[in-house]
Amino acid sequence: MTDVNQLTTEALDLLMQLISVPRISRSESEAADIVARFLSSRGMNVHREANNVWVIASGYDAKRPTLLLNAHIDTVKPAAAWTRDPFSPLLAGDCLYGLGANDDGASLVSLIQTFRVLSSHPQTYNLIMLASAEEEVSGVDGLSRVVPLLPSVDVALVGEPTGMQPAVAERGLMVLDCTATGKAGHAARNEGINAIYIAMQDIEWIRSYRFEHVSALLGPVKMTTTIINSGTQHNVIPDSCTFTVDVRSNEFYSNEEIYNKVRACVKSNVQARSFRLGSSHIDIAHPLVRSALALGALPDGTPRRTFGSPTLSDQALMPWPSLKMGPGDSARSHTANEFIYISELRQAIREYISMLDGLVL
């Protein structure tokens, strides 16, 4: 019989160890060491690439489907408003305070414990647990570096703070750097071509344009101008104006499609920083989703429902279907005095095991 309380105690200890070491994106080496030691001490064959750590359950069979459990090791930098040491874990009643407790430590340790239980006896699927690096910056040395090294994966469960509600879709992200080009002249005379005015027309198009397909889960494609720079002094007509656009895609459009539409409809030069971070989704009829919904209402009586997530995760880099679901609250992520409830850890471990043990993919 699975002792969820003991698993929670061990998970809490591991999480406190992780909080105790800085693990800001691209500097997760010590945290990866901690995860690797924990898994090795439990008799697992640990694989590591850069600061990514993974284990494959014994009995792997290429003829069976494969489920990947994934959560990330890294954190953002601590916010300036912290009133306690973000790297000193503090237990206060049911709360554990510390940087990364909610995002994404709770999901990480809960999935590790779930992997231990599921891999202790035969399943109908292959199982991999991956603790990935650089998620907060979508870094090239994070999940992208590991994907080519993994066996073929059919579906993933990504641990992120969703209150254990199943997120079946996630917005993509693309950043556009735009440059409007005019001609310099003296502001006192009717000469020159003002690049700001060109940019204003393009920004207004970006603000008002509506892509045709609206997602029931994610809503419309969202384009937001967030940075504008132009001009050198008050009496010179600016010959250049640069602006940055934050684009959040839904599952109906690739980043390349959105980029091509913008480029065709504005006068400014448009460059995409990357097309890597596309929108992701999973069929609500997928066995993994059905199993999550079969858990029933949350402990407080809230109905369990699928939803679309506005925040980005490593799902954007996964070439297979994935479901995002984990303990904690996204509203606590990246905030001062971040915390997780111990009861949320216990709930996650119990529910992860219940939805995955014996699952038929």
Image: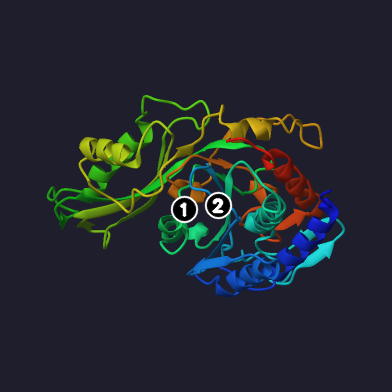
Residue 207 screen position, x and y as percent = 37, 36
Q: Which mark is residue 205?
A: none
Amino acid residing under circle 2: Tyr
The colouring scheme, among rainbow, by chain, secondary structure or one colour, is rainbow
Viewer-side residue, 18 vs 258: 18
The relative height of residue 203 versus residue 68 in the rendered view (above or below) is above
The residue at the point 82 percent across, 51 percent down is 4
Tell me if label 2 and label 1 are in contact, CB under 8 Å.
yes
Viewer-side residue, 150 vs 156: 150
Viewer-side residue, 20 vs 246: 20
> Left or right: 36 with respect to 264?
right
Q: Quadrant of residue 203?
A: top left
Mark earlier in primary sequence (2, 1): 2
Report whether residue 140 is seen: yes
| Residue labelled with disc 2 | 60
| Residue labelled with disc 1 | 151
Q: Nearer the viewer, mark 2 or mark 1?
A: 2
